[in-house]
């Protein structure tokens, strides 16, 4: 039961973080509701803080590789570009 409760708290915290960063759809009513949820239980705030840190860290990660652009670059590179030269040794 505790695991299920923790999962629910985590999912709710993650949803709040995600919604909060959707500034177009996160108005004053949503903020009031979020703050009430945060104040209802210290576990809510702990989970929210953890989710917010994760969100920020994920934002620092580079975007996923653009496979099509990578293929184009690979096709443009000549075989000589890939082979090490005598100067590299």
Image: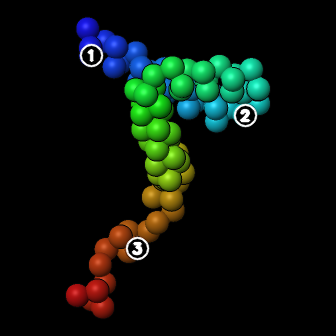
- For the C terminus, the image quarter is bottom left
Q: Is residue 24 left or right of residue 49?
A: right
Q: CA distance from mark 1 to mark 2?
A: 31 Å
Q: CA distance from mark 3 to mark 2?
A: 46 Å
Q: In terms of sequence position, does the residue under pointer 3 or pointer 2 come before the other?
A: 2
Q: In this rendering, which labeled residue sits more in front, label 3 or label 2?
A: 2
Q: Which mark is residue 56?
A: none
Q: Position of residue 74 (x, y in %)?
A: 45, 58
Q: Are marks 3 and 2 in contact (CB under 8 Å)?
A: no
Q: Is residue 31 visible?
A: yes
The residue under label 1 is 3
Q: Residue furthest top?
A: 1
> Vertically, is 5 above or below 87?
above
The residue under label 3 is 81
Q: Which mark is residue 23?
A: 2
For label 2, the SS is helix
Type of colouring: rainbow
Q: Position of residue 36 (x, y in %)?
A: 60, 21
Q: Residue furthest bottom?
A: 87
Q: Is residue 51 visible?
A: no
For label 3, the SS is helix
């Amino acid at each position: 039961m505790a695991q299920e409760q923790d999962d629910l708290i985590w999912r709710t915290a993650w949803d709040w973080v995600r919604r909060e960063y959707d500034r177009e759809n996160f108005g004053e009513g949503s903020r009031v509701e979020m703050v009430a949820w945060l104040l209802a239980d210290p576990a809510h705030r702990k989970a929210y803080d953890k989710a917010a840190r994760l969100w920020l860290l994920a934002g620092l990660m580079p975007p996923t590789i653009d496979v099509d652009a990578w293929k184009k670059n690979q096709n443009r590179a000549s075989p000589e570009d890939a082979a090490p030269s005598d100067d590299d040794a």
